[in-house]
Amino acid sequence: MLDAMRAATQNWIGRTIMTIVMGLLIFAFGFWGIADIFRGFGANELAHIGSDTISVDTYRNAYQTELQGLQQRAHRAITNQQARQMGLDRQVLTRLVSESVLDQETRRLGLALGNHDLAEEIIRDDAFKGPNGKFDRQLFENRLQEAGLTEQTFVAEQRRAYLRRQIITALTAGLEMPQTMLDAIHRYYDETRSIDYIVLPQSTVGKIAPPNESVLKAYYDARRQGYRTREYRKVTVLAVTLKSLSEQLAKTAPISQADLKKYYEQVKAARFTVPEKRHLQQIVFPNKAAADAASKQLAGGTSFDALIKERKLTEKDIDLGTVTKSDMVDPTIAAAAFALPQDQVSQPIKGKFGWVLLRVAKILPGSVTPFEKVALPLRQELLLIHAHQEINKIHDKIEDQRDAGKTLAEAAKSVGLTVRTVELDSEGYNKSGQPLTDLPDLEALVKAVFASDVGVDNAPLSTQAGGTVWFEVKSIDPAHQQSFAEVKDAVTLAWTQDERAKRLAAKADALVKKLKGGETLAALATEMHSDVKHQDGVKRSGGTGLSQGEVAQIFDQKVGGIGSATAASGDRMIFEVVGAKVPPIDPKDKAFNKIVAGVKTSLSEDVIDQYLGVLGRDLGIKINQQALRTAIGSE
């Protein structure tokens, strides 16, 4: 939560910079001279960075925060072991070390941030803005409470984060890409090539005679791992989704027009009504007498603008902005302002902050989207609401049945539903090699299935779309090595395909040798009763009808170069590169600009990486590896 709040408080430059600093860029322990030293640490000390210390508690809290965030993004539980395999423990440690290194550098440089500037940064933070787009104190306090922070702790952390950004901004703000590098990138991505080519079909190698048993057996033995079956699990699944339920309810319990209009009226004010807005101006007076005197001046012919000048007020002094009635904090002023006609000045009004005269500079009328325009999406929405209510009832009924000892199939039947039985591997494919894409949240379901066992009473899974999936593992077909006899037909087919490809490649190589010896493509085409084909505009990102293998071979040759490559169909292409063009750099090319931005980020990464490496070596970084393992419960 704290990391999300940190990110939210940064502008786009800050976001980019802190992503660089706190992400993959600072895995630079090799440059930092970190020593595994076990002496000189206190009981709660995990790392020494110069004069700073990272405690075990600080690291553990940061690690748990990151782990919870990772679980929320993955929509599943992640164990400590899985998190360590992802490198989460090192990511958290390097972030804390980086922050400490930068904090010490800010102190050495004497950097500071005034309270007013820091307050402005926090007030502008979108994470703390209410529905009206303004800073919401209550929301701010709620967010801090959720994060387990006091206001003082949060403000202190934001001050440190801002000062770190000052250093990183100074390092990277003026960084420019060398023109030579820019040209090289442009050439790589935007160069186009033209080729002449002929196609050498597979049929030119003739029929491949089947090999004898010993050849096939040797081919199988060399590729035994390719003939192992995967583990498959037979699973009974009951998936109840909001979409399927809403579609069913649309047929069995459709929404009446009366109920739909009633729902529309309930949400109309909040969702389909654009309130009237008014651009308001006001002059504030110290007392009623002053306000009455000004009102008499207006009645005598003095204009409102003249009154503003007479009182030496600026536009900023009198402007209340364009607001809705609910935006105004003073109900008395709001009532008077929204009762005035446009361009008319009010009588003196006693508000919370004194006596005022109001003028309505402009009126922006409100509007209401009519029922007919939103009836269809509202009907779907109401069906989903009913489906959500129904899914909760189904969940409770099925769980009651399972608690009573019923199988999943029996529990489903009791509520008028049917289960389905599937066989799948650990990647969600059936025995035919097809993905079971019609199951909701397939990845999460597969992980749960392979973490379970036969006969286990599994907890239901909640889907990302709001549904529920129940499952029971009925049987397990373990992975095993298939014998030669079992896969002989498949081995024969694979050997035949490989042999055909070898012979075709050899024939293509012979033709390429002829071309390099001076024969022309046209002559070869005549000899083969074929045609010379031509293609322009081939880029490294691909060409029309060309496989990536063909494109790679084309760009592996110089202009005038000759080569061959296997097409996606299995045929062979023999080609000559007849031309290459590099268009001028287009500064408006979004794809190219995106690539350049990525390279600039990499350059910034290198600069920051080296900078942190130098600071780390100068300060000296020592890690208590035993405390690190203890903090996250690893062996």
Image: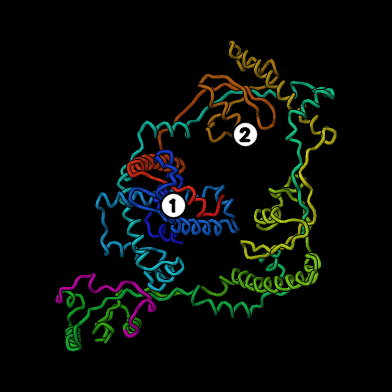
Amino acid identity at mark 2: Gly
Q: How many angstroms separate mark 1 from mark 2 (CA)?
A: 58 Å
Residue at the spot 80% in from the left edge and 29% down from the top edge = 492
- The answer to whether residue 207 is above or below residue 303 is above
* Colour option used: rainbow
Residue at the spot 28% in from the left edge and 52% down from the top edge = 107
Q: Count neighbours of disc 1 (C-alpha within 10 A) and say few if under 14, some if 14 to 19, many if 20 or more.
A: many
Q: In the rendering, at what x and y percent does residue 285 appear?
A: 20, 82
**Going by the image, does 375 lie left or right of 391?**
left
User: To which residue does mark 2 refer?
Assistant: 545
Most foreground residue, 331 or 520: 331
Q: Which residues are the magenta region?
A: 310-332
User: To which residue does mark 1 refer?
Assistant: 46
- The answer to whether residue 523 is above or below residue 298 is above
Q: In the rendering, at what x and y percent does residue 110 appear?
A: 24, 52
Q: Secondary structure at mark 2?
A: loop
Amino acid identity at mark 1: Leu
Most foreground residue, 339 or 460: 460
Q: Are marks 1 and 2 in contact (CB under 8 Å)?
A: no
The tag earlier along the polypeptide, 1 or 2, is 1
From this viewpoint, is residue 142 visible? yes
Q: Secondary structure at mark 1?
A: strand
Picture quadrant where residue 355 is located: bottom left
Residue at the spot 68% in from the left edge and 68% down from the top edge = 246
The verdict on residue 155 being magenta is: no
- The answer to whether residue 442 is above or below residue 133 is above
Picture quadrant where residue 565 is located: top right
